[in-house]
Image (spheres, rainbow, N blue to C red):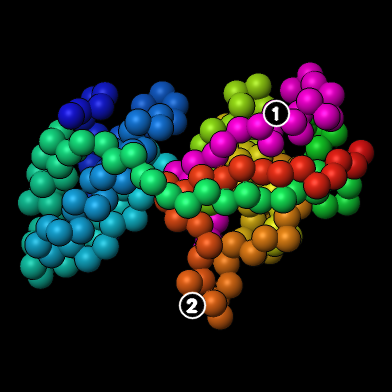
Amino acid sequence: MTIGPAPRISLAGSGALLLDGAQASFDDAVQELVWAVAEAARGLDGVRETVPGMNNLLVLFDPLVTDASRVGEQLQSLWAGTDPQTATGTLHRIPVHYGGSSGEDLAGWAAHCGLSLEETVNRHAAATYSVAAIGAMPGFPYLSGLDPRLTWPRRKNPRLKVAEGAVIIGGAQAGIMPMTAPSGWHIIGHTDVRLFDIEAQSPVLLRPGDKIQFEITGIEQ
């Protein structure tokens, strides 16, 4: 089953290819195909690792075993002949305190959307989000499913320090900071749920295909 046009495949160094299936905007069906192709490609000779991104897929291979041309042809074939994979991931309920000192962009976000604080928060918490990909930093989830009314372009000037646990908005995506780091996303709240713990048996809490529902524990101006 083919979804949309053939993907663009380009070199990403001497031992990697980037398959880009993105179209005009993020597409959940394309993401499901990315997950399926990622799983199938792991079985190809010479492929070391596959890393799903947002409507794209990074494939790392051993150039002593295979070559970019061969892997590219195999990826094109998999894209055309693999059924999309509807992931049956874990549902995570994430408690969030919105606004206040740990959600400093909440009022600006509501104003940008033309909604009250309460309606903005309720819309954010009403959605069920999918973990489309993990990237940018260990454990960081790119979440699809944000209400289109709540989209907000990323900041022109990123903050140099956004705290672990910050619940954030960037464009048409939602996210949660797994550690304190720079970010250009808007901070709307905070959760105490840890997404990354290097000392845990499974350091990363979320996986592609998991679902998230946010639960409101409080709203501050």
Name the image quarter holding the N terminus. Answer: top left
* Dot 2 crowding, Cα within 10 Å, few <14, some 14–19, many 20+: few
- Image x and y of residue 70, in percent: 7, 51
Tag 2: amino acid: Gln
Q: Quadrant of the C terminus?
A: top right
5 or 123, which lies in front? 123
Judging by the rendered image, the residue that carries numbered circle 2 is: 201
**Height in image: 129 above or below 140?**
above
The residue type indicated by label 1 comes to Arg
Evaluate whether residue 111 shows in this view. Answer: no
Q: Quadrant of residue 3?
A: top left
Q: Residue furthest bottom?
A: 199
Q: What residue is shown at x 36% (from left), y 44% (from top)?
A: 87
Residue drawn at (29%, 41%), measured in percent from left and top?
A: 85
Boundaries of the magenta span: 112-140
Residue at the spot 15% in from the left edge and 59% down from the top edge? 43
Residue at the image point whose x is 72% and y is 50% from the top? 95
In the rendered image, which residue does mark 1 sit on? Answer: 123
- The picture quadrant where one finds residue 23 is top left
In this rendering, position of residue 104 left or right of residue 16:
right
Q: In this rendering, would 70 be left or right of 50? A: left
Q: Is residue 120 magenta?
A: yes
- Cα distance in 3D space between marks 2 and 1: 35 Å
